Image (cartoon, helix red, strand yellow):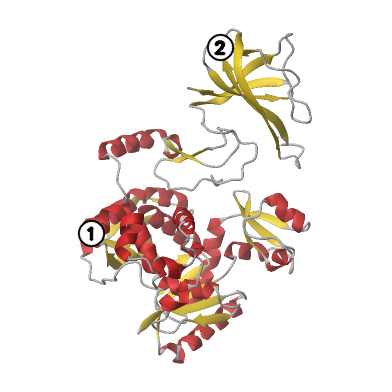
Amino acid sequence: MMRTLVVWCPDWPVMAELAEQPEGTPVAVLSAGTVLACSPGARADGVRRGMRRRDAQSRSPELVVAEHRPEADARAFEEVLVAVEELTAGVSPLRPGLCAIRLSSRFYGGEAEAAAVVAERLVALGVWDVRLGVADTLFAAEQAARRAAAQDCLVVPEGQARAFVADLPIDVLEDAELVSLLRRLGLTTLGAFASLPASDVLTRFGSQGAVLHRLAQGLDPAPVSRRDLPPELERQVVFEPALESSETVAFSVRAAADAFVARLADRGVVCTAVRIEADVDQVVASSRTWRHPRWFGGADLVDRVRWQLEGAALGGPGRGIDAVRFVPETTETVADHADPLFGPRPDERVERAVARVQSMVGHEGVVQVRVQGGRSPADRRAASPWGEQTDPQRARQGPWPASIPAPAPAVVFPVPRAARVVGASGQVVGVDGRGAVTCEPTRVRVEEEGWQPVASWAGPWPVDERWWDEASARRVARFQVVGVNGTAWLMLVENGQWWTEARYD
């Protein structure tokens, strides 16, 4: 029986940074202002994943902080993939720091023996913290690797995947919205979730919930149906002239990746393993099979192209990339869940119109806005180029102290407008060090508009931001002010100057 061996290198983003620092130096890699990965030295000082920069530095005064560089992760992990491929063919990278191998029970004399050979090879390469897991399914093997000791392997016996994952916390499903809902329903483990009838899960949580339900049962995301796919399902993009930047190539293959996924969906299948080939001077210069724990979407394929090209160091003067191909290697049936699986698509005419505008004004010229966490309305806007499924930098969930209560204002000004708010005797309203107003607001004026009496007001909401950095420190107080004509404003005062940030309808 073919089983799955997963190789996991914890805190992989910090490995490239450790190579540039003296031994024992505490190092942390940050993403969006929080700790993404940290070295053993930093962890010994109390630094943990998810900490903010200042909290981490307070725990470890000698902490070396570096920003996350995904391209460096991909390049460094390429050496690991090459080393594992010297031992066995068919390595499937999942993401930098994590890969999987389809393992025969007779490989190197047994599963534990095979894992020991792989671990020994990577330790010799300098990757001392490597953990391995073996199970019937990819999901169970990954969870086993995450619970193994350093340089060790946890083997889940054949047919025991469901029993192994049953006691795991529901958080391992990595779907924040579904996990939150299941917790409110009292389902805190995968075993409790797996005990629900599959038909009820599909009805209540949709196709995504049904897929995660299969994972909780120790099964593959969908019944595997391997087949020989016709050649026309391959997708190739040719660049004339050749492109020298991996970022340019990744952007240029986006349409082909979406078309590749859509064509598979038309046949009622999704792709869980894809081979990506890149040509330089009309010769295959890089070929790798990527595996996904669920299925590939268009954005997933674009990410893999970028990682592969950066890891192989392709591109640059004289090394232009002239073609990229997507070749499906493993597919799984979608059955009657094909439409919910990919979600509703917008009107094709809208897509064509937006794509046309984007082609004229540039990739960054057309953006889509999502809501993220923040105190002010402007902070809560997260804009990204249209078509990219990027996550907001700040979580919407709190705590966000001093944030403005609902409802949100209807219009947020790109640049705050100058304003004045005065009391009964004409003095400018201010906020003292204790957060109290110096006098009650009675009149308000926004830019060139005339003065009008204040009908009602609320606040202040004082905010003391980045107080630890003298250069960027900011201390403001926000108010909600309503004029007698019914117009409502979100205003702030900073250093005695009033500004209008937004307007309520």
Query: Farthest residue in the bottom direction?
Result: 109
Q: Is residue 366 above or below residue 89?
A: above
Q: What residue does disc 1 label?
A: 336
Q: Which amino acid does label 2 sit on?
A: Val
Q: Is residue 75 visible?
A: yes
Mark linked to residue 484: 2
Foreground pick, 222 / 29 = 222
Taking the spot 42% from the left edge, 88% from the top edge, the residue there is 107
Query: Farthest residue in the front direction?
Result: 186
Separation of residues labelled 1 and 2 (CA atoms): 58 Å
Taking the spot 57% from the left edge, 55% from the top edge, the residue there is 69
Q: Is residue 237 visible?
A: no
Dot 2: element: loop
Taking the spot 63% from the left edge, 59% from the top edge, the residue there is 49
Foreground pick, 157 / 74 = 157
Residue 274 in the image: x percent, y percent? Answer: 35, 65
Residue 291 in the image: x percent, y percent? Answer: 39, 67
Count all numbered tags in the image, as a single digit. Answer: 2
- Quadrant of residue 290 within the rendered picture: bottom left
Quadrant into which the N terminus falls: bottom left
243 sits to left or right of 372: left
Dot 1: element: helix
Looking at the rendered image, the disc whose residue lies closer to the viewer, 1 or 2, is: 2
127 sits to left or right of 381: right
Q: What residue type is labelled 1?
A: Asp
Q: Callout 2 environment at 10 Å: few (<14), some (14 to 19), or many (20+)?
A: few
239 sits to left or right of 172: left
Q: Callout 1 environment at 10 Å: few (<14), some (14 to 19), or many (20+)?
A: few
